[in-house]
Amino acid sequence: MPYAPRDYVKLIGMEGFSETLLKNHFILYQGYVTNTNKVLDALDQLVKDGKTGTLEFAELKRRLGWEFNGMRLHEYYFENLGGKGGMNKDGKLAKKMVESLGSSETWEKDFRATGAMRGIGWVVLYQDTSSGRLINVWINEHDVSHLAGCNPLLIMDVFEHAFMLDYGLKRADYIEAFFKNINWAAVEARVK
């Protein structure tokens, strides 16, 4: 069954994100969905044709992580946007932040600092499903640096396409707009 792009048009009108920026970002995301399906179809055909020992098979297997994670990280990102309120300070997410980092303020300082680092990629708040600990992680490429056995809770895209159209080189202003629009209920629902 092929993957279908999800509809995030409800995010248009969100403060700090222009319609043009969001529509361009949605098109980019749709490309990851399309390419994920193409890679999976090609791999299925190579297996059916008995061509699993080929360079094409190997390269497509390597490419799958890039396309699939590009699709899924964008879905998490868009789904944790569109909120208007603050985090529930009595919720399980805030309690995990206190356990892991001492306070939600310390967590936020670390998350923002991670997002402000030079380079392109993603910032992901992970929960280690083994210990419950929360860890902010920089991901350079879609298919590199993910923490095995961890559940992504909050995702911030820091590739240029996520902010340059609206903010130019002012990444800190984008991060501020991102924080104003976090859908904390969606993030909280991801906590295990």
Image (cartoon, grey):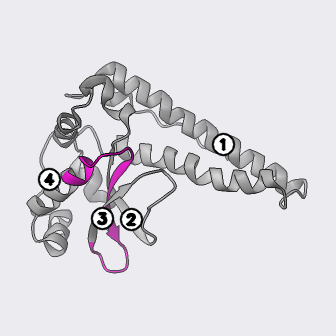
Q: Residues within 10 Å of mark 4 (few under 14, many from 20)?
A: some
Q: Amino acid at mark 2?
A: Asn
Mark 4 and mark 1 lie on one chain; the one further toward the N terminus is: 1
Please report the residue visible at 26 percent of the width from the left and 37 percent of the height from the top: 82
Residue drawn at x 21%, y 32% is: 170
Magenta span of residues: 113-133
Residue at the outermost front position? 118
Q: Amino acid at mark 3?
A: Val
The image shows residue 184, relative to residue 169, as above or below, that is: below
Vertical order, 47 against 92 (above or below): above
Which element is circle 1 on? helix
In the rendered structure, find residue 37 and report the number of the disc placed on it. Answer: 1
Marks 1 and 3, how far apart in space? 29 Å
Distance (Cα) linking label 3 and label 4: 13 Å
- In primary-sequence order, the first of circles 4 and 2 is 4
Disc with the residue nearer the chain's start (2 vs 1) = 1
Distance (Cα) linking label 4 and label 1: 36 Å
* Observer able to see residue 4: no
Label 4: which secondary element:
loop
Q: Secondary structure at mark 3?
A: loop
Identify the residue under disc 4.
Answer: 87
